Image: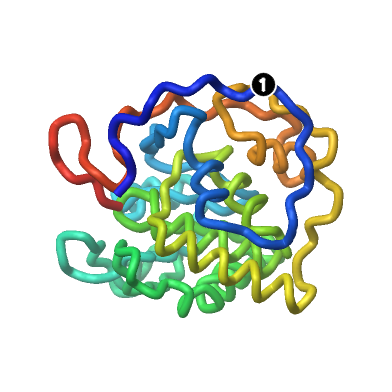
Amino acid sequence: MKKSSPAKQQPPPPAEVTVPDNEVTVQQLNELLSNSSGFYSLPTQHFNEVFPRIYVGNAFVGQNLMRLQKLGVTHILNAAEGNSFMHVNTNAEFYAGSGITYHGIQANDKPQFNLSTFFEEGADFIEKALAHNNGKGKVYVHCREGYSRSPTIVIAYLMLRHKLDARVAVATVRLKREIGPNDGFLHQLCQLNEKLAKEGKLNWGDASRGCQVKDKRLPALTAAACTLQLLQPSCNSPQGPCRRNRRGKSPGGRAVRD
């Protein structure tokens, strides 16, 4: 369980980012997701375009056909398919006649759930979605809140299809949307990173050298994404921190789950 009342810490001074070794840890990824005081942020928008033509968002928009069509969404990936409280009960029939192609993954937002078995499946669907209509397709990837399951699938896609190191992939999505995959999912991303690194399928290179941290609230590794052409060239801060435990309880005492 994440600490709900972290000790006050002085934010680190701006510094040049050094390229880490090939080993990626859950702690490193958590540092990318939280600020220097250990706080995590809840999403401030229903959805965000986290990568060109890839949207990560919540079930509210995922079930709003008019909104999806207005966005020009051609494909939708439900990473929380199911009919229980923690799932989103949609299927291909729900989108029949809308022109939107549906794919569902029956995932639970629990650390012990093996989401990695769906990484390739999710990446294949996203890749085909983007290639739709001569490369003009748009895909909306969602779970309940667009906070844990769906961003993990998109991060895995960036690693598998764009050869991004897990840290850069996490930073890429985090700079566009407040996310908080559970530690089990982060561990699975670390394992994927190790596998791809051994196979020579990651492009880390020296892209992050010399990138300055412009916002002291963000961990230094977040700056690794600044020099990627995939992102805007600035290290804009996400919205302010949410004062709650990412995997604990909200101020009102209610457990927060994706």
Would you call the spot at circle 1 few (<14 residues within 10 Å), some (14-19), or many (20 or more)? few
Residue 192 quadrant: bottom right
Residue at image coords 70%, 23%: 14
Compared to residue 32, the image places residue 15 above or below, namely: above
Residue at image coords 13%, 36%: 253
Residue 50 visible somewhere in the drawing? yes
- Count the marks: how many? 1
Left or right of residue 66, residue 131 in this image: right
Residue at image coords 52%, 59%: 139
Residue 129 vs residue 248, the one in the foreground: 248
Rendering coords of residue 66 (x, y %): 36, 49
Badge 1 is on which residue?
A: 13
Badge 1 marks a residue whose secondary structure is loop
Compared to residue 82, the image places residue 52 above or below, namely: above
Left or right of residue 164, residue 82 in this image: left
Rendering coords of residue 206 (x, y %): 86, 49
Rendering coords of residue 136 (x, y %): 66, 58
Residue 45 visible somewhere in the drawing? no
Rendering coords of residue 199 (x, y %): 75, 78
Residue 258 vs residue 255, the one in the foreground: 255
Residue 137 quadrant: bottom right
Q: Label 1 sits on what residue type?
A: Pro
Residue 203 quadrant: bottom right
Residue 90 vs residue 184, the one in the foreground: 184
- The chosen color scheme is rainbow
Residue at image coords 32%, 39%: 3
